[in-house]
């Protein structure tokens, strides 16, 4: 049993005196069997009333808060503080209401004999399965402080990766918003003032002008239907993505889209390698590590293939062999390096190196993304503006020539 569990069991009376909310009388008794004897734990009232699958609804904890939670808990555990005292201190320092509520419930669970990993389980969608698995392994091996420190470091790298990707998307987003704004201004404000002039000319208008008038008239006559259609399309697409088969198909197509596909592969490879490395480094078995790693990936194609890889390894096969059989989604270098790691017994170090390699690839791609997308967006914007200019200027020029 970890040090902190012994600390909690040795001082139950002092804790109930200082924290009246933890009074055992207010909690229902739940029996939990162990290999040695049957132990009675007292669960908090909040856990009794709310089912575990609904408990974290409405609770959101940012990645930065998770990093600070893991880092501070690691330091406190290393300094010799009990988990219960650490949770109570972190609750006083927490800023968000969600974090305060979560820490309060976790403190109640730990005060009544639960392990920290068990207290985290009702909030699996908040802290992720990786967070819970690393904590559970640390409790079992007596290396909770070290595991939490590893976890904080990996979460920080994950945050940096997300920041790079979002930063790379800012410039294209601004350009797209600019194009949509210009087109909307022309269609709904400028064209209605110009089109009546063209209609009074009683001359044959050039094709670009006729197209422009048709588009402007359609947009003005069916504005509400266009907006309604866009909303319906967006909702339908969002609902279809809730279906696993549709979402997986979308994820598979995304892998083969230029630029976006290579970036998606690199992101999933980096996440796969780093998550599996930290799990193996913390002492988890390879099959369990693969199961947990697969569940942390956002792309369903990779999630299913990692799950299949876990079954292959469970039956005595090699991870590298399964990955090598899927060269279209798993790069050849990945399977070869993993094969080397399996042969030398340094798989976690190999995965750590691969994670760094793919993160560097992501960094380079995001830096060059604006350089690649900028010409395309400028060509589209220039094409729209040029077409409008030709459609407006051409008939005016024809009229002036006729007058001369």
Image (spheres, rainbow, N blue to C red):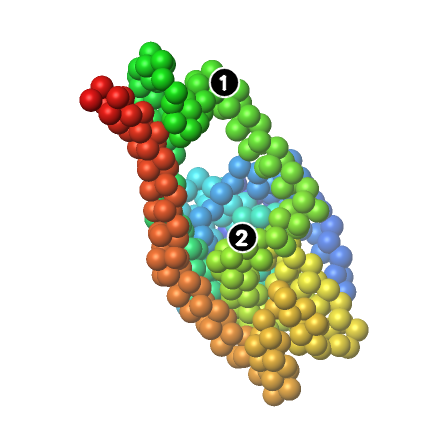
Residue 346 is situated, as x and y percent measured from the top left of the image, at 57, 83
Quarter of the image that includes the N terminus: bottom right
Residue 305 visible (yes or no): yes
Q: Secondary structure at mark 1?
A: loop
Residue 144 visible (yes or no): no
The residue pinned by badge 1 equals 222
Taking depth in this image into account, of 186 and 201 the one nearest to the observer is 201
Residue 292 is situated, as x and y percent measured from the top left of the image, at 64, 62
- Which residue occupies 54% across, 79% down? 350
The answer to whether marks 1 and 2 mark residues whose Cβ atoms lie closer than 8 Å is no
- Which residue occupies 53% across, 20% down? 225
The answer to which image quadrant residue 298 occupies is: bottom right
Rendered position, 231 above or below 368: above
Taking depth in this image into account, of 22 and 206 the one nearest to the observer is 206
Counting residues from the N terminus, which is met first, the one under dot 1 or under dot 2? 2
Q: CA distance from mark 1 to mark 2?
A: 47 Å
The residue pinned by badge 2 equals 127
């Amino acid at each position: 049993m970890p040090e902190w569990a012994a600390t909690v069991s040795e001082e139950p009376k002092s804790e109930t005196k200082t924290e009246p909310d933890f009074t055992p009388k207010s909690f229902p008794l739940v029996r939990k069997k162990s290999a040695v004897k049957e132990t009675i734990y007292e669960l908090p009232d909040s856990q009794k009333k709310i089912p575990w699958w609904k408990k974290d609804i409405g609770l959101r904890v940012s990645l930065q808060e998770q990093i600070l939670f893991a880092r501070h808990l690691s330091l406190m555990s290393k300094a010799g503080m009990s988990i219960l005292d650490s949770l109570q201190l972190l609750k006083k320092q927490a800023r968000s209401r969600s974090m305060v509520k979560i820490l309060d419930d976790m403190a109640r669970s730990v005060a009544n004999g639960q392990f920290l990993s068990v207290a985290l389980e009702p909030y699996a969608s908040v802290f992720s399965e990786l967070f819970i698995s690393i904590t559970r392994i640390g409790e079992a091996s007596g290396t909770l402080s070290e595991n939490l420190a590893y976890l904080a470091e990996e979460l920080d790298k994950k945050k940096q990766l997300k920041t790079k990707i979002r930063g790379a998307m800012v410039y294209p987003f601004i350009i797209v918003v600019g194009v949509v704004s210009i087109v909307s201004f022309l269609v709904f404000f400028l064209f209605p003032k110009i089109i009546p002039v063209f209609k009074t000319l009683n001359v044959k208008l050039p094709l670009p002008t006729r197209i422009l008038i048709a588009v402007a008239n359609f947009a003005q006559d069916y504005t509400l239907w266009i907006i309604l259609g866009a909303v319906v399309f967006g909702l339908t697409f969002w609902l279809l993505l809730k279906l696993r088969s549709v979402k997986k198909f979308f994820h598979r197509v995304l892998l083969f889209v230029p630029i976006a596909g290579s970036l998606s592969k690199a992101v999933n490879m980096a996440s796969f390698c780093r998550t599996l490395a930290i799990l193996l480094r913390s002492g988890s078995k390879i099959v369990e590590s693969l199961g947990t790693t697969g569940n942390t990936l956002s792309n369903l194609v990779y999630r299913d293939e990692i799950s299949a890889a876990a079954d292959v390894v469970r039956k005595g096969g090699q991870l590298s062999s399964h990955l090598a059989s899927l060269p279209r989604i798993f790069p050849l270098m990945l399977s070869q390096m993993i094969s080397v790691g399996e042969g030398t017994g340094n798989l976690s170090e190999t995965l750590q190196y691969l994670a760094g390699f793919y993160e560097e690839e992501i960094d380079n791609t995001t830096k060059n993304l604006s350089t690649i997308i900028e010409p395309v967006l400028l060509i589209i914007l220039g094409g729209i503006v040029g077409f409008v200019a030709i459609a407006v200027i051409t008939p005016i020029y024809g009229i002036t020539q006729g007058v001369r």
